Image (tube, rainbow, N blue to C red):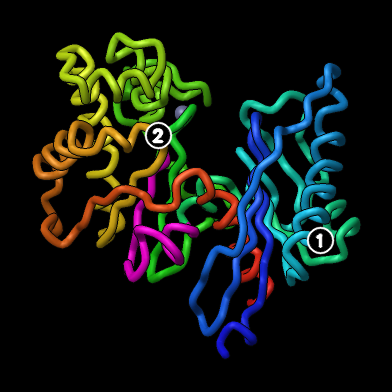
């Protein structure tokens, strides 16, 4: 039985609201998801106490997940921001209070649970999950975008997620679309994220939230449709840049707004057709992500398994 040869790996996805986890099994290079669940991320009033509290919770959740699902070989932790892959410490996390600079994360979790533990950026984890188990399966080179509070990015070349020397490669949301564009939260102006993050989508569509924008557009609301088309144009510019540089055969778009389907994808395609001049766009498939809300945890698990194996 192939199942008897399978190894199991735990992934944790640290978010400001929820701490998600997934156990995946790998056998003969194919991956399956065994279990997923989530708990609310622990909140404490004192921001200075948040990092240690959250790291302790990561270790507790890891131990509980392994107690529930059986032994795992490795632990991966997806973090919403910048980290140091060599030391397993965070550098800067978006949306989580407290000072995360130099915060040990992988070390304490590894010590508490007794397993090799690796960090990965949450968008790169999303991309790796889609590459191995989801909409990116079989792709040679893949570009991934996850549309949420921010715009997460990832790219894979020859079947491997490219991390750069410091784990920051793939920040597609923070490449410049317009040198004189609006300020981005990162401090640059005219980033793709400054046009395509959730609050900007809502503003462009005249709705309170991005989810509402999708519903309004699907119900035929003209302003919402025009807003999504405008956002799609900027996304298309960004994706066209990536196609020109990387020449991927698959573009995977995830996050809640991807539910808009062709209302968002058609303007993206139109912009790609307008701008890409060097490679055949017929060979580039633009598809929706498949793994939904668990992609980050699944990808973190896969990342750790692959890191431990190299
Ligand atoms: Zn930016």
Q: In terms of secondary structure, where does tag 1 sit?
A: helix
- The residue range painted magenta reads 128-147
- Residue at 73 percent of width and 24 percent of height: 97
Query: Mark 2 sits on what residue?
Result: 256
The magenta stretch spans residue 37? no
Label 2, label 1: how far apart the Cα atoms are: 32 Å
Q: Where in the figure is residue 95, as x and y percent of width and height?
A: 63, 26
- Residue at 20 percent of width and 30 percent of height: 233
- Nearer to the camera, 129 or 230: 129
Q: Which mark is residue 67?
A: 1
From this view, report whether residue 176 is shown above or below residue 137.
above
Quadrant for the N terminus, please. bottom right
Q: Where in the figure is residue 55, as x and y percent of width and height?
A: 82, 42
Graded by Cα atoms within 10 Å as few (under 14), some (14 to 19) or many (20 or more), the crowding at tag 2 reads: some
First in sequence, mark 2 or 1: give its number: 1
Query: In this image, 266 relative to 124: left or right?
Result: left
Graded by Cα atoms within 10 Å as few (under 14), some (14 to 19) or many (20 or more), the crowding at tag 1 reads: few
Label 1, ligand 1: CB separation under 8 Å: no
């Amino acid at each position: 039985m192939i199942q008897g040869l399978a190894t199991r790996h735990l992934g944790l996805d640290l978010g400001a609201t929820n701490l998600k986890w997934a156990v995946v099994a790998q056998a003969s290079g194919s991956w399956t998801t065994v279990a997923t669940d989530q708990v609310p991320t622990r909140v404490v009033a004192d921001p200075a106490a948040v990092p240690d509290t959250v790291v302790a919770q990561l270790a507790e959740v890891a131990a509980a997940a392994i107690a529930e699902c059986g032994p795992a070989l490795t632990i991966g932790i997806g973090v919403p921001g910048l980290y140091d892959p060599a030391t397993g410490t965070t550098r800067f996390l978006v949306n989580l209070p407290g000072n995360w600079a130099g915060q040990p994360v992988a070390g304490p979790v590894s010590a508490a649970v007794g397993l090799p533990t690796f960090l990965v950026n949450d968008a790169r984890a999303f991309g790796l999950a889609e590459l191995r188990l989801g909409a990116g399966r079989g792709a040679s080179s893949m570009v991934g975008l996850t549309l949420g509070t921010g715009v997460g990015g990832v790219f894979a070349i020859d079947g491997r997620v490219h991390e750069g020397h410091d784990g920051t490669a793939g920040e597609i949301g923070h490449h410049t679309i317009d040198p004189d564009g609006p300020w981005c939260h990162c401090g640059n102006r005219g980033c793709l994220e400054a046009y395509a993050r959730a609050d900007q989508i809502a503003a462009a569509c005249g709705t309170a939230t991005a989810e509402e924008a999708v519903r309004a557009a699907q119900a035929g609301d003209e302003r919402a449709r025009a807003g999504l088309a405008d956002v799609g144009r900027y996304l298309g510019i960004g994706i066209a840049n990536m196609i020109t540089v990387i020449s991927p055969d698959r573009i995977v778009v995830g996050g809640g707004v991807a539910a808009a389907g062709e209302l968002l994808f058609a303007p993206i395609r139109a912009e790609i057709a307008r701008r890409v001049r060097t490679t055949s766009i017929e060979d580039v498939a633009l598809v929706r992500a498949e793994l939904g809300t668990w992609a980050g945890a699944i990808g973190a698990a896969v990342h750790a398994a692959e890191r431990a194996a190299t």
